Image (tube, helix red, strand yellow):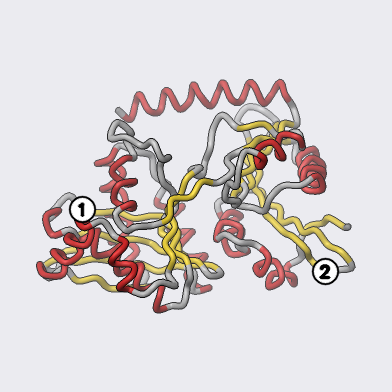
Amino acid sequence: MIVREVLDKEKAAYNKLVKHVVQSWEWGEFRKKVGLDLARIGHFEDDKMLSAYQLTFHSVPFLKQTIGYLPKGPMVDQKTVEALSDLGDKKNAAFIKIEPNVIASGQTDGEQLEKLGLIPSAKSLFTRYNFLIDLTKSEGELLSAMHPKTRYNIGLAQKKGVEVYESVDDSDFEIYLKLYFETTKRQGYFGHTPDYHKLVWETLKPSKMARFLIAKYKGKPLTAWMLFNFGETMYYPYGGSSNEHKEVMASNLVAWEAIKLGKRLGFSVFDMWGALGPEATEADPWYGFHRFKAGYGPSHVEYIGTYDLILKPTYYNLLNIADKLRWTFLRATRR
């Protein structure tokens, strides 16, 4: 087997192998525009690409070190670990964080990764749990699976005259961005920068992988979602809403329209981009988002989790301590 970087002319073959939008070729181009060092790796047998993945390397301020990040890639095996270790050495990486796009099937998943030398990470970037909706079901089946309150809120929004439209117009980007940052401020969490969202939009839109759904009430935008699509899946990664006219339940209608849009476009799965665990309580600051998504009757899935491939133990420990201190400070100042 030969392991090497994927060539530009191999884009189509690469995209057929990867299974998540953040592993797509287009997402990789976006990450390069952000200024990150990106590597696309393919495993080949007789010139045929058998598996592929991409990862980014992030410079550490004040240290001549990097941190690698491989989100939503394939299951890791010995050959992958060897390839990542070699690449990490070339990139001067202290460690590589790995989050396979693999739904857990039992304790053996983690044991398999630990036998390869990976350790469970102290910090995840993608959530371990997620909500997935089967878009091959009929609209009637999807409505029946919803929580009664969710169905009621959808009907209420329709009766109140909330209108939802799909858009790929750049003019609607500003509507989306305004509502997104209204939400981050109101909820007290850290969102991506305006430039980040702009680059995502400008990179994915030409490939027809991004669109907006916007809800208006009496002409005023109340909710805006940016949706992605790749392969057989539609994703809901980012959204925002106004604090005005919450009584008309605009967000509930946007979610239902997103599900119907995914069906019309022929996708088989609607990925809601994260959930809390099965023991979630109202004490969790993300519980509101979790409960909202759960109302649509999705499957609650658990991935095998986040693991670190440690290349330089001393730097690894130092960077983990520094990261904890940084986030403690940021959360304190945010409050």
Q: Which residue is mark 2?
A: 48
Q: Quadrant of the C terminus?
A: top left
**Are the residues at dot 1 and dot 2 in contact (C-beta closer than 8 Å)?**
no
125 is higher (above) or lower (below) than 24: above
Mark 1 residue type = Ser
Question: For this rendering, which residue is in front, 110 or 218?
Answer: 110
Distance CA(mark 1)–CA(mark 2): 50 Å
Give the crowd class for mark 1: few <14, some 14-19, many >=20 residues within 10 Å: many
Q: Quadrant of residue 211?
A: bottom left
Question: For this rendering, which residue is in front, 176 or 73?
Answer: 73
Residue 213 location (% of width, % of height):
32, 67
Q: On the picture, is 147 further left or further right than 55? A: left
Q: Quadrant of residue 256?
A: bottom left
Question: For this rendering, which residue is in front, 70 or 154?
Answer: 154
Residue 185 location (% of width, % of height):
28, 41
Q: Which residue is mark 1?
A: 242
Mark 2: secondary structure: strand
Q: On the picture, is 322 further left or further right than 282? A: right
Q: Quadrant of residue 151?
A: bottom left
Q: Which mark is residue 110?
A: none
30 is higher (above) or lower (below) than 192: below
Q: Nearer the viewer, mark 1 or mark 2?
A: 2
Question: For this rendering, which residue is in front, 222 or 91?
Answer: 222
Residue 178 location (% of width, % of height):
28, 54
Q: On the picture, is 218 further left or further right than 281? A: left
Mark 2 residue type = Lys
Task: Please give the name of the residue rendered at 33% of the width and 33% of the height, measured from the top-left corner.
Answer: 284
Visible residue check, residue 116 = yes
Sequence order check, earlier mark of 1 and 2: 2
Mark 1: secondary structure: loop
Task: Please give the name of the residue rendered at 28% of the width and 65% of the height, measured from the top-left corner.
Answer: 144
Task: Please give the name of the residue rendered at 55% of the width and 61% of the height, measured from the top-left corner.
Answer: 21
